[in-house]
Amino acid sequence: MLKHRLLILLLLPWIAAGCSGAKEDTVRHFIAHRGATMRCTLAGENSREAIRYAARAGFDCIETDVRWTSDSVLVAVHDATLARTFTYNDGRPVPKETAVSDISYAELRDSFRLKAARPEYRTRVLTLEEFCTECRNCGLRTFIEPKKVTPDWVYPQLIATADRVFGRGGYVITSNNDANDRIRLEMGIRDIPLMGILYQSTYEHIASLGGTVMAISATRFGEEEYFAHVSRAKADGLETESHADYFEHFDRINNADIDYVSTDLLAPDYTGQGETIYQSRGRDVGKIASESAASGKVEFGAVYLDLEWSGSATITLASQTFALPETASPRRARHQLLVFDTVPAFEITSPSENFRIKRISLHIVRF
């Protein structure tokens, strides 16, 4: 009986994908990973600007990270060191070995700036409380990640800060799973939602903690194993999360019932946000490419592609180029990207002899 149940769970997403392609009318949440920064170009990681850009783009969730200074101030910083995401005030690079925990909060705030393409967005670090307050004011559900090596004193201070801003249970702690064990099993706290990362622990252990979102990696698991994990979580009534930045992984998510999509580069699903500056009509790819280019440079926005095809081809969409998988019968896929200070490129190249477009839509939005 168990073998039959596992087989059914494994086959369910494949049956759904084969019948309908990407899922229709799925209500899901998009998490702006460290804010909408487009990898420290649009704005600095975990900055006030990144929070506001995320809200403008239509994200309803956001994720941040917690580090601590030498004088025990919790700050919204991902890395243990400053080199990747900070410069000195004058733009000089920071030595690779400069650790957040070796610097006082006053020095971190006054001597360093977050990296961003625009000088006006090279701003100061936020404390965890400042970050959470901005997220609350922007209406973003906040996921807070303690790092793997986190001192004991950080947890009660982190929780007290988040409780003060959001109220108990109004946020999610997402972690390396060590934090989840600390909060549930050692601190005995049951009323804070958690997110557990599956490849770092077992499914059974994460589920046993209660109140958990199951984070299922679209990159670390093979396709078959990925869909089996998603089906199992859904059968057990658990919410699910996956991260994607590129077509291959987002296509997999679109064919699974994922509740939370975390991303650095994708645009959230279009629900009317922003100003439409181009909407394609018909299936003439050359016309769509020229018309979309004529819409001009987008300071900050998104491009949405919705395509049903057979055969195979290569697509260029904004800054990404990807291959459409070979298919004999019509198959639907979507891709959607944030764009910053660019003309959103669109092109289809290297079509197979049997490549056919049944339906295509290209939508460009300015936020």
Image (cartoon, rainbow, N blue to C red):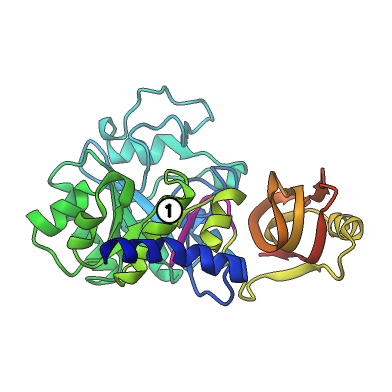
* The stretch drawn in magenta includes residue 159: no
Question: Which one is in front, 259 or 62?
Answer: 259
* 228 vs 344, nearest the viewer: 228
Please give left or right for residue 26 compared with residue 187 in the image: right
Residue 259 part of the magenta segment: yes
Residue 168 picture location, percent across and down: 22, 71
Dot 1 falls on a residue whose secondary structure is helix
Quarter of the image with the C terminus in it: bottom right
Region rendered in magenta: 257-266
| Residue ID at (13%, 47%) | 153
The image shows residue 55 at horizontal and vertical percentages of: 52, 66
Quadrant of the drawing holding the N terminus: bottom left
Q: Which residue is mark 1?
A: 226
Pinpoint residue 59: horizontal percent, then vertical percent. 51, 65
Instruction: Name the residue: 31% across, 51% down.
Output: 198
Q: Is residue 102 visible?
A: yes
Residue 283 vs residue 278, the one in the foreground: 283
Q: Residue at x 75, y 50 (%)?
A: 312
Residue 109 lies in what quarter of the image?
Answer: top left
Q: Main secondary structure of the magenta part?
A: loop
Position of residue 93 relative to residue 182, above or below, is: above
Label 1 CA crowd tier, 10 Å (few <14, some 14–19, many 20+): many
Image coordinates for residue 289, horizontal then vertical, percent? 86, 55
Please name the residue shown 29% across and 44% down the image: 200
The answer to whether residue 132 is seen in the rendering is: no
Q: Looking at numbered disc 1 in the image, what kind of residue is underneath it?
A: Tyr
Picture mark count: 1
Q: Quadrant of residue 147?
A: top left
